[in-house]
Image (cartoon, grey):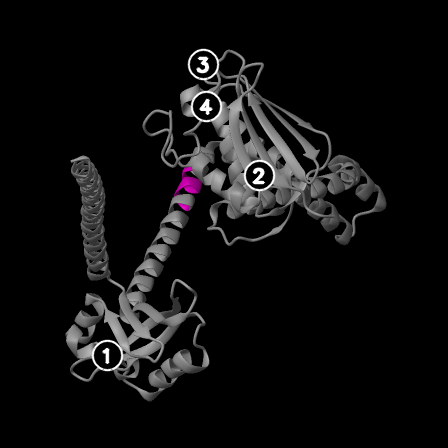
Amino acid sequence: MADDDAAGKGDASRQTVELLAAATAAAAEDGIWLDVIHKMDEVYNDLLQYEVSLEEKNAALEDSQQFISSVLTSMSDLLIVCSRSGLIESVNQALLTLLGVDEKSLHGRPLFDLFADDESRQNAGRLLVEQIGQTLADGEFMLRAANGSGIPVSLNCTPRYSGVGKLLGVVITGRPLGELKRAYQALRRAHEDLKTTQHQLIHSEKMASLGRLVAGVAHELNNPISFVYGNAIALKRYEERFSRYLAAIHGGASPEQCSALREELRIDRMLSDLPSLIDGTLEGAERTRDIVDALKRFSVKDRDERQECDLREIVERAVSWIQKGIASQFSVRLLFDVTLCTLGSPGQLLQVVMNLVQNAADATEGVQQRSLEISGRAEGQDAVIEFHDNGPGIPAGNLGKLFEPFFTTKAVGRGTGLGLAISYGIVERHGGTLTAGNHPGGGGLFCLRLPLAKG
């Protein structure tokens, strides 16, 4: 019995161990399956994220392709993309329209088939063989249209590389030469029209300025002409007396009679007056000639002459003309340290100074004692001339507009609004500057700066 009991207990122990082993194995197997399921969930999530990312990239790629396609379609310039071997890979609508063909008929064909003459094909061959990888700008070629006609074009060629720097082929862009020529001709016509209009405006402004100065110039001309006229009358009277005296001498009059007639006619006094009368007449004639020459230089159209001119002399002449054309008192004071000479057109510079002096005269209307101070000095390589009037000054809102064409604060009929704008352009062409502002002590201040002539 004891042996039977012991055997029973041993069987029970083995069963317990087997049950425990089976339970352990089952638990391990369940853990493995849980790990597998967990990993599958992770892989599935990764696949979902990858699919979402792929869809986003596909959408972005489609947008990029649509954008590139729309740009290529909208381009008015010609576009040809070729492989390194010279086969056409892509073209745009502008080329298809120009040649009258469809894209399928060009894709994969040699680039040389596009050209209408041997010279263009030879030049294209050099680009793809001898000069591959180089850039061409504005090369002229003849393309062949569908009807066989030649179309002159201007082409640019640029090498095309991969992301790692490998040469893939070339990109060719361009446009028909006919369009370029028409655009150039239109631009040239516009430029010529602009130059003509500019010259007309300058000349019109000069004539307007000249018209305002007629009274002053007439007064200036009147002085020497009156002087010459008076001397001519005196010489005429002297001529009559000299004729009478010489007639008496040649008529056989006695020495006593000739001496008495000489005293009566005041021959000695007339002889002493002759040099001064002749010199005065010559001086008056020269002054008249100078005034007329200055008027001619001022009124003729500009020829961009360049000569050395004395700025003080130009300022003095401008002041003289303006002052004589102004009814009320307008005093001008000149302060020049040294002689200032510049290289330029005397007539154009005279126009500038006259505009500045006239503007100062207009700005001081209503002031009891109108005055203008013009000072000249040398600063480095420049001549600086400042025009300071005692008017009310320039409003801050107008300072930035003074040199704009047609801007004026004057009443209708008193100014064209072109004087300062044209003066600004003239000074700029002479390599100088013209600025405007207000003097710290009151009144307007214009500063004219021009390069000094190199002695």
Residue linked to disc 4:
362
Q: Position of residue 371 (x, y in %)?
A: 56, 19
62 over 218 or under it: above or below: below
Which range is magenta?
A: 203-208
Spatial CA span between label 2 and label 1: 91 Å
For label 4, the SS is helix
Q: Position of residue 142 (x, y in %)?
A: 30, 80
Q: Name the kind of residue labelled 2 in the image.
A: Ile
User: Badge 1 is on which residue?
Assistant: 108
The mark nearer the N terminus, 1 or 4, is 1
Q: Identify the mark at residue 366; answer none if there is no mark.
A: 3
Q: Earlier in the sequence, mark 2 or mark 1?
A: 1
Mark 4 or 2 closer to N-term?
Answer: 2
Residue type of the residue flagged with mark 4: Asp
Three-letter code, disc 3: Gly
Give the image location of residue 50, x and y in percent.
Answer: 22, 49
Q: Residue at x 72, y 45 (%)?
A: 242
Query: Label 1 is placed on what type of residue?
Result: Gly
Tag 2 residue? 225
